[in-house]
Image: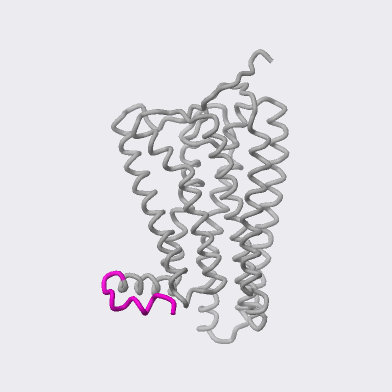
Amino acid sequence: MSNHSSVSEVTLLRFSEAWELEILYFVMFLVIYLSVLMGNILIIVVVILENNLHNPMHFFLMNLSILDVGTISVIIPKAMVNSLLDITTISYAGCATQVFFFLFLVGADFALLTVMAYDRYVAICKPLHYEMVMNRRACIQMACNAWVSGILNSIMHTWNMFPFTFCGGNAVDLFFCEVLQLLKLSCSDAYLRELCMLFFSFCLMLSCFILIVASYIQIFITVLRIPSQQGRHKAFSTCIPHLTVVSLFVFSATVAYLKPTSHTSTGLDLIVGVIYSVVPPTMNPIIYSIRNKDILAAVRKLARCLLFPDHRMHILPQ
């Protein structure tokens, strides 16, 4: 018990010992953060304003954009402040807050991606029942369930990890507080409990992944039965953005949580941290904007509205 200690702050990984490089990282993170904010907020705005986007698919996309804004806002601002002011610490409460909101938003994100896969399944495999199954009330309930599942998952982990005593110092090998990094510092009892909870969360994530795969198997079988090539292309085009986002999410999470853990700081830890915390929310608006013609048309209409006020009535709901 003599090695146990209580601390008031946690030391985060410094990107570089050179102050000039720290400023470079600040600029890089600032560009990424502003790009993510602009891209996701633009999607949220056009979905709200454009009547043609008032459907389940774009309603879930709007929720996904809100989660992406929250995910990157939990991490990037603190990393920018640390780089600009050349500091490497975060308060104990701030560390707990990062863990809670990051786990909440990431968990809700994947749950929402599962709901979006079900939406595509119903739209393509059961088109005659789509409006009845994916009605307004059902969509709101499914979106709320995704958010609640993320909150419950986050509470479970945060309640176990905080408060805890440090047995391995107070320095994490990442630029934000993350469960796997904190496990290296926690005592054995908290470590074993958290491993059990991580396994439980993994099983839930695996169940969501299996549901997504099962949905797309049915979708592919149905699409291949469509006689016209144009019909098959149209059906596939509505699924490609979602499939790309799911693949990016699963790949980044797999790299982060299944890579061998080490008790020393490595460049791989930093790269992996950036991949699964920054890349998905950065790429999601780009993927959906490029592949979704309705979103592109709504963005162009919004741009015309802002540049030429006479076009305002074309975009604002009646």
**Horizontally, is 41 left or right of 153 in the view?**
left
Q: Main secondary structure of the magenta part?
A: helix
Q: Is residue 151 above or below residue 306?
A: above
Residue at x 49% of width, y 59% of height: 65
**Horizontally, is 102 left or right of 17 in the view?**
right
Residue at x 32% of width, y 42% of height: 27
- Rendering colour mode: one colour
Which residues, given as a range, are shown in magenta?
306-318
The percent coordinates of residue 85 (x first, y second) are 35, 31
Placement of the C terminus among the 4 image quadrants: bottom left
Q: Is residue 84 above or below residue 307?
A: above
Residue at x 66% of width, y 13% of height: 2
Query: How many numbered discs sit on the rendered protein?
Result: 0
Q: Is 311 part of what is drawn in magenta? A: yes
Does any portion of residue 109 appear in the rendered image?
yes
The percent coordinates of residue 116 (x first, y second) are 59, 65
The percent coordinates of residue 55 (x first, y second) are 54, 74
Q: Is residue 226 above or below residue 159?
A: below
The percent coordinates of residue 125 (x first, y second) are 65, 77
Q: Is residue 195 above or below residue 87?
A: below
Q: Is 308 part of what is drawn in magenta? A: yes
Where residue 138 sits, quadrant-wise, is: bottom right
